[in-house]
Image: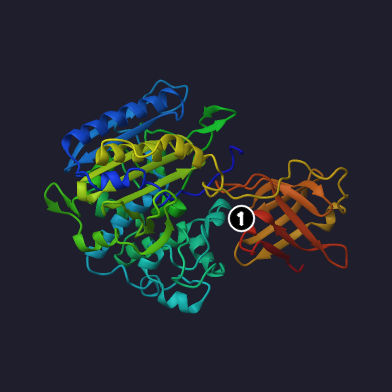
Amino acid sequence: MHINRFFTPLVLLGGLLHSSSYSSALAQQENAVDVSRVKLAVEKLDQLAQKEVGEHAVVGMAVAVVYNDKVILARGYGPREIGREAQIDTDTVFQLASVSKPIGATVVAALVGEGKISWDSKISDLDPGFQMYEDYVTREITIRDLYAHRSGLPEHAGDLLEDMGYDRAQVLYRLRFQKPASSFRSKYAYTNFGLTEGAVAAAKANGLSWEDASDAMLYKPLGMKSTSSRYCDYINRSNKAPAHVLDRGEWLQKYNREPDAQSPAGGVSTSVNDIAQWMRLRLANGKFDGKQVISEKPLLETQQPQMLVRFSPLSGLPAFYGLGMNIGYDEQGRLRLGHSGGFCMGNATSIALVPAEHIGVAVLTNSYPVGVAEALTASFTDYALYGKLTQDWQALFKKIFADPETLGLNTSANYAKGPNPPSPALINTAYLGNYNNDLYGEVAVSLKGGRLLLEEGPKLMSFPLQHYNHDTFTYLPPGENSPGRSGVTFSIGADGKAVSVCIENLNQQGQGVFQRKKD
């Protein structure tokens, strides 16, 4: 796997955390959490965190546990940045990636509680400029549809536009050109920018930007002083844990992920001290320090199943998505909430909540996703609920995360070794020109220093084209969704010049062909 191959924020593998290994025995036991089990779970979590950092499975992490409305564990482990002395503490700020979604859903619930909107408010009423590919969907789609990932958009629609340098407004505008992958409300398909539009529309209806709404409705009332939905706030923190990737077996700090375009879906940064306060609020159904900060009804709607995601391969139990939250039920019928997040630029996070037992855990790491965050939240929850592990979660998640398909990584043809000898290309001038595509905009093929360049995105980022065979070249796409080298294949007209170009990494949904613009 190339270290520059990035994936979009990862959804927790729905249903996997409910093992049936001990189901029949556990069904005959008293399974309510008690103080002794929580103490054991905290001890085990602390030991596992120290072990993983000590063995360099991750660079560093911070963990928090909430039980009965109290923070009973908050601790940092390891360095903020590899090769530097500063250590992670409970105020160290991490990027959350997709754990931003349940936090953002809490903000929307607070906005719904203000009375101007509901989860079923139509986007066409709240943000009339937004359009989907089909007119009917444009008219009918709601905040609920977008937060439940049932819009009909393909998985991760818009993410490649962000990689190309389009900002939030530009990406949301261009979704009108994205052909649906399924009929409206018929299928679950995880889309960062669909959810982002739901959040932006909810805030807009209340006269606020998304970032200001997050501050006003959640972060300030809970005293979350280290939390922000703005990348500039994160990058300006002195006490932050930057991202790390593995390079030939060594952890390196190489990339910075700027997720403002999809802030409601992946742009929150916070500390374990702060995220513990959010868990307290969630587990208390909107109350904080005895005060009802967020209305209970709209908040509880976020943890009601909206779409079936899958059935657990371990237990056979169904797993659902609610509103910005993964939802499941264990063998004892307890509601289980969770979400995972990850940037292949070097962050991995996980949260798990069991409302009936008033317990929650968060694990934040400054390292590329390898399954450690998920393994620790699953292990803690097992110890707290059952007093023992039901699976070797560390081994299981590390195996799962070793599979690029699990991580949602895009794949392309293997261009490492081409035909020998390759068929020659035409003269360079045959390929030069401007090409247009409704969804992705304009690209240009230019010549500099005798070498062909592909220019794409609103800032015309420039990438050298490397000849592969005949009229096919390759380039290295930008962003966290890059599959590694991707094909760029020209179709040649009767006049010996290219009439179109297919850019492979943009063609996953069949919309990656660009037509030459007329001179």
Quadrant showing the N terminus: top right
In terms of depth relative to the viewer, which is nearer, 340 or 485?
340
Viewer-proximal residue among 482 and 381: 381
Could you tell me residue 382's position as x and y percent?
A: 30, 40
The answer to whether 214 appears left or right of 178 in the picture is left
Instruction: Please name the residue shown 47% across and 39% down the image.
Output: 369
| Residue shown at the point (46%, 29%) measured from the top left | 57
Image location (x, y in percent) of residue 220: 23, 48
Residue 65 relative to residue 519: left or right: left
62 is higher (above) or lower (below) than 494:
above
Rendered location of residue 168, percent (x, y): 47, 57
Establish if 301 lies above or below 342. below
Total numbered circles: 1
Residue 77, percent across and down? 35, 27
Res 221 seen here: no
Query: Disc 1 on helix, strand or loop?
Result: loop
Q: Is residue 262 visible?
A: yes
In the picture, which quadrant includes the C terminus? Answer: bottom right
Disc 1 designates what residue? 457
The answer to whether 43 appears left or right of 340 in the picture is: left
State whether residue 287 is above or below residue 371. below
Looking at the picture, tell me which residue is in the foreground, 303 or 320.
320
Q: Mark 1: which amino acid?
A: Gly
Here the colouring is: rainbow
Residue depicted at x 80% and y 47% = 467
509 sits left or right of 211 in the view:
right
Q: Residues within 10 Å of mark 1 (few under 14, many from 20)?
A: some
